[in-house]
Image (cartoon, rainbow, N blue to C red):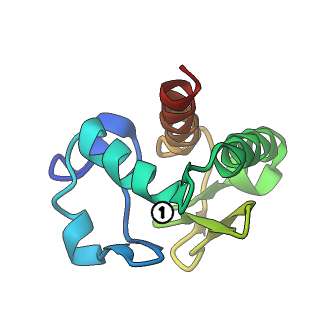
Amino acid sequence: FRDATTTSHELGFRLTALVHGDYRVSQNDSRSLETKTQFLECLEHYLCNEQGFDMGVATQFVDELKAVSLALSKSEVYHQHELVGTSLLFLHCNGKAAIRWIDFANSMPSEGGDDNGISDGVHRMSLAVQELIGKYSA
């Protein structure tokens, strides 16, 4: 199931909320983000600091997303559960970045085989961050 009124339909993931300094995208506001372009604008604001685009944080997020992908491929829990409603929490402060996988309350054992597009969403998120890195590297 992909909600056609959010970026979930186009990108395989959706933004739920975002806060960085004075820049905020509330849960309510995030429901109106439907396109990759809209999402990239929000992500770009999130990855900027007083000096501009924070290449270090962006690169750390790409590395963290690679680690999530690797963990998914090796995880027995991932392959044996339906992980409905889980989220990736992106954090950054003072040049350090981290991603944590959260919200497992609705997870349940399954026969496996259907990842609900999670690995594809992680991959597409990585591509989105890499697209912004490319924009600021040029």
Q: Is residue 110 left or right of residue 65?
A: left
Residue reaching furthest to the front: 51
Residue type at tag 1: Val
Image coordinates for residue 119, horizontal then vertical, percent? 59, 39
Mark 1 Cα within 10 Å, few/some/many (few <14, many 20+)? some
In the image, 1 versus 122, the foreground residue is 122
Residue hosting label 1: 84
Image coordinates for residue 55, horizontal then vertical, percent? 65, 42
User: In this orientation, does residue 54 appear?
Assistant: yes
User: Vertically, is 105 above or below 12?
Assistant: below
> Which residue is painted at 49% across and 41% down in the image?
121
Task: Determine which quarter of the picture holds residue 137.
Answer: top right
Image coordinates for residue 82, horizontal then vertical, percent? 56, 57
User: Vertically, is 56 above or below 32?
Assistant: above
In the image, 81 versus 45, the foreground residue is 45
User: Vertically, is 48 above or below 85?
Assistant: above
In the image, 101 versus 34, the foreground residue is 34
Residue reaching furthest to the top: 138
Q: Secondary structure at mark 1?
A: loop
> Which residue is painted at 58% across and 37% down in the image?
126
Q: Is residue 18 left or right of residue 2?
A: right
User: In this orientation, does residue 1 appear?
Assistant: no
In the image, 83 versus 29, the foreground residue is 29
User: Vertically, is 95 above or below 35?
Assistant: below
> Which residue is painted at 48% across and 27% down in the image?
135
